[in-house]
Image (cartoon, helix red, strand yellow):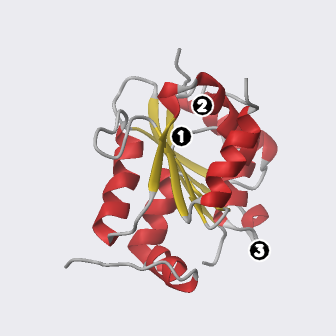
Amino acid sequence: MAMDARDIESMIKAALPDAVVEIRDLAGDGDHYAATVTSSAFKGKSRVQQHQMVYAALQGRMGGALHALALTTLAPDN
Amino acid sequence: MADANQIIDNEVKSNDVVLFMKGTPQFPMCGFSGQVVQILNYLGVPYKGVNVLEDETIRQGIKDYSNWPTIPQLYVKGEFIGGCDITREMFQAGELQQLFADKGIPVQQSA
């Protein structure tokens, strides 16, 4: 099973509407991605909390349909 | 059968540094687990590796324990630090070294 990069982006944006999402397909197999997500919702949150917010947006697909998503989260202005 | 959550909780609380990973520190079975092993080895930090591939209840249980969907997972003094990405980011920023120092865990960084 794999996920399309556009689906990943739209799921993240559905949960974090102001998010700027950049996704790279690392292996060209639709299964190993790297994503950078920037959202003001991350302000004041720890890295673990920020990543948990993205995982929550993906509604359980992370670790399932989506094997590998190397994640970088950023709050604007830092 | 012992409760997975209890086993995990015991490992996390009775070891200063625990890495739940796929494979062992000697033979990581996944590139992400391998990256964290390399960082910990580089820092010379004593840690315990728990191979989740040996026990399906631990493999699922650790995800529920931390509300974190992926493996590896690094714990220091009972606190969930992060997975591969966060550990690497912290290492590159020098924050991981600081964290170990703050928690009183000896770091023997070889140049």
The answer to whether any part of residue A38 appears in the image is no
Tell me the distance, in whole angstroms, between the alpha carbons under discs 1 and 2: 8 Å
Q: Which residue is mark 3?
A: A44
* Residue occupying the point 64% across, 55% down: B12
Q: Secondary structure at mark 2?
A: helix
* Residue occupying the point 46% across, 65% down: B89
* Residue occupying the point 56% across, 66% down: B16
- For the residues labelled 3 and 2, say whether their Cβ atoms are less than 8 Å apart: no
Q: Where is residue B17? Give x, y as percent.
A: 52, 62
Rendered-image quadrant of the C terminus of chain B: bottom left
Q: Chain of mark 1?
A: B
Please tell me how crowded label 2 is: few (under 14), some (14-19), or many (20+) other residues with Cα within 10 Å. Answer: many
- For the residues labelled 1 and 2, say whether their Cβ atoms are less than 8 Å apart: yes
Q: Which residue is mark 2?
A: B59
Q: Secondary structure at mark 1?
A: loop
| Most foreground residue, A29 or A20 | A29
Please tell me how crowded label 3 is: few (under 14), some (14-19), or many (20+) other residues with Cα within 10 Å. Answer: few
Q: Chain of mark 2?
A: B
Q: Which three-letter amino acid code belongs to the residue tagged 2?
A: Arg
Quadrant of residue A28 within the rendered picture: top left
Q: In front of the other: label 3 or label 2?
A: 2
Q: Which residue is mark 1?
A: B71
